[in-house]
Amino acid sequence: IAGITQAPTSQILAAGRRMTLRCTQDMRHNAMYWYRQDLGLGLRLIHYSNTAGTTGKGEVPDGYSVSRANTDDFPLTLASAVPSQTSVYFCASSEVSGGANEQFFGPGTRLTVL
Amino acid sequence: GQNIDQPTEMTATEGAIVQINCTYQTSGFNGLFWYQQHAGEAPTFLSYNVLDGLEEKGRFSSFLSRSKGYSYLLLKELQMKDSASYLCAVIGNDYKLSFGAGTTVTVRA
């Protein structure tokens, strides 16, 4: 059982380039999330999806977009990367959104924008 | 907005007890989570509290006081493998998790 997978594991990217971070879960969870984790700031929600076909903005959505074409996949796209997007990105999922529903996290993608 | 505060670092000796405090001021409250995160790894679920009181799970316990906006995570019989960051997270009225910056616990022999 894989749970949640993310790709790539790490990436160095030139500023201005477009980049898509991939996230796939095999738990048939309805809700999925993208966070970034920066030293001293903790995890911050970028975008979320409560169910396939719907998405919503989190705390820090600017410069990022997402899509949720099916239950399993939730890619995060940086249209034109900037150095401030250097961070560790975690994808997560939960059975449904909110309440006592534990979120399961992927292994993360370490992104460096130069 | 959400404001979640926890100490940055704590150090304790193997076999000892450590208490990690978390205070929060959020737009509504629908539960509080504690996650453990080892360096370079993903966060993993430890506990969930929505009612006041103590929830015990083996060596780990979590306490909640909603009226005080306060929680703590108690780690007993510390082991070297407990060296990690511990993240406090609150679900507000938007039903989304807001995380504190995390507390790094170092266990020394």
Image: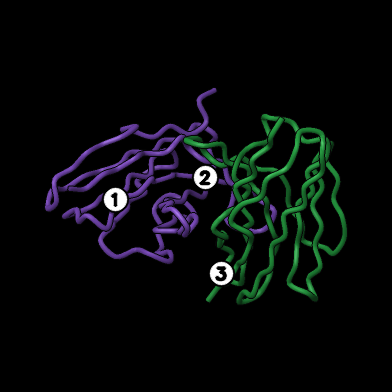
Chain colours: A purple, B green
Q: Nearer the viewer, mark 1 or mark 2?
A: 1
Is the residue at mark 1 from the same chain as the one at mark 2? Answer: yes
Q: Give the quadrant of residue B71.
A: bottom right
Q: Which mark is residue A64?
A: none
**Which of the pair A91/A82 is nearer the observer?**
A82
In the rendered structure, the answer to whether residue B65 lies left or right of residue A45 reads right
The amino acid on which the numbered mark 2 sits, given as a three-letter code, is Ser
Q: Position of residue A38 (x, y in %)?
A: 41, 53
Is the residue at mark 3 from the same chain as the one at mark 1? Answer: no
Residue annotated with mark 3 = B94
**Which of the pair B25/A5 is nearer the observer?**
B25
Dot 1 falls on a residue whose secondary structure is loop
Cα separation between marks 3 and 2: 17 Å
For the point 34% across and 49% down, which residue is it? A87
Chain of residue at mark 3: B
The relative height of residue A84 versus residue A59 in the rendered view (above or below) is: above
Q: Which mark is residue A86?
A: 1
In the rendered structure, the answer to whether residue B31 lies left or right of residue B59 reads left
Residue annotated with mark 2 = A93
Chain of residue at mark 1: A
